[in-house]
Image (cartoon, rainbow, N blue to C red):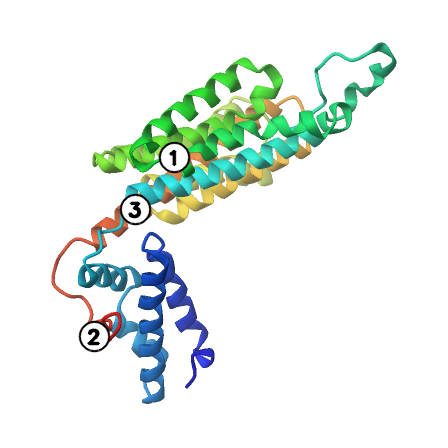
Amino acid sequence: MSDDGLPEAAWTYLRALDAELSDVPSGTAEEIVADVRAHIADALDSGRSADEILAGLGAARDVARQAREELGLPAQDRPARAGRTLSLVAVAVGVLIAVCVSFLLPSAVPVEPIQADSGEQGVLRRLGPGIALLTLLPALVAAAPLVAPARARAGVRFAGATVLTMFACAAGETGLYYFPLALMAWAAAIVPWALRRGAGGRWWRYLTGGFVAMPGVLVAVASAGGSVGVGWVGAALWIAGPLAAGALCAYGIRAGYAVTALAGALVMALSMAERGFLFAAFWLFGGLYLALGAAAYTASRAVDGDAAATPGPPARPEPAPAPGG
């Protein structure tokens, strides 16, 4: 069977292996993946099923760990990878916020009287693309750790988070839009720091679950007191949803973290589309959900990866082929 004839399950496995080797020099990583791909193809030619072959190889992270040991490569720095992932998410959030500010946020900069009716126009139409590009500067601050030297990366992350927080607090209405970016920058700074020191554990899960469940508790209390009317649909969205997601987070179930991050992004998008009286509350809570969910999800993956990399008895009946063998 040719490589192009591999089943989809094999290609999914190879992509996961390549992701686990993302910090390995590209030529070495390509050689490892090519050897595993050839091993899978030979086993398929001998009549074995794809499920049997992949079960024999074991998890992709285990194969990557064994290849590192055989080649004398350093173990994967999972805290650094978690920080890099969160920094990338922060950059994406910063770019999306810049687009929203440039196209949707009416500018508060004074203009000539003849242009008085332009107050309803966005920054881009009112001030031109050159000024609108300045809205990307916070995203560039969030991207600085991605290009900083490894030894300075932690300091750059904390400095960037501090600068973004000061900007969000000092820039008035425009700064409000950048609070979610500041929260993501703090997540990118704190998570690697905490992972390296073994911080977290049960109290971190409970704290995350409490923050996630808080809106549901507040709405439930207000509804019970009669100050807010909530129908069945509203109860499902604003009470049951946050409480269920908070419970999943408190129990350390990774799906709860992913749901929390996605819910935060959705709330931010909806609040931007329908900017009303409670826009600031929904925007900030959406940003908090996004930052908490992304941080907890990334941290849980790093912790699980470290646990899987702990030396112990082999868990698979068939070792992965040695690179070059």
The numbered disc on residue 148 is 1
Rendering coords of residue 167 (x, y %): 51, 18
Give the secondary structure at mark 3.
helix
Rendering coords of residue 32 (x, y %): 31, 67
| Along the line of sight, the residue nearer the viewer: 308 or 79 | 79
Say if residue 228 shows up in the picture: yes
Dot 1 amino acid type: Ala
Residue picked out by circle 3: 302
Distance (Cα) linking label 2 and label 3: 25 Å
Label 1–label 3 contact, CB within 8 A: no
Instruction: Nearest to the eye among marks 1 and 3: give it.
Output: 1
Left or right of 215 in this view: 34: left
Give the secondary structure at mark 2.
loop
Would you place residue 148 above or below residue 4 in this image?
A: above
Give the secondary structure at mark 1.
loop
Label 2–label 3 contact, CB within 8 A: no
Distance (Cα) linking label 1 and label 2: 41 Å
Dot 3 amino acid type: Ala
At label 3, counting other C-alpha atoms closer than 10 Å, the crowd grade (few under 14, some 14-19, many 20 or more) is many
Pointer 1 or 3: first along the chain: 1
Rendering coords of residue 253 (x, y %): 34, 47
Residue picked out by circle 2: 318
Residue 158: which quarter of the image?
top left
- Name the residue at 52% across, 19% down: 168
At label 2, counting other C-alpha atoms closer than 10 Å, the crowd grade (few under 14, some 14-19, many 20 or more) is few
Left or right of 177 in this view: 111: right
Q: What residue occupies the far left of the structure in this picture?
A: 313
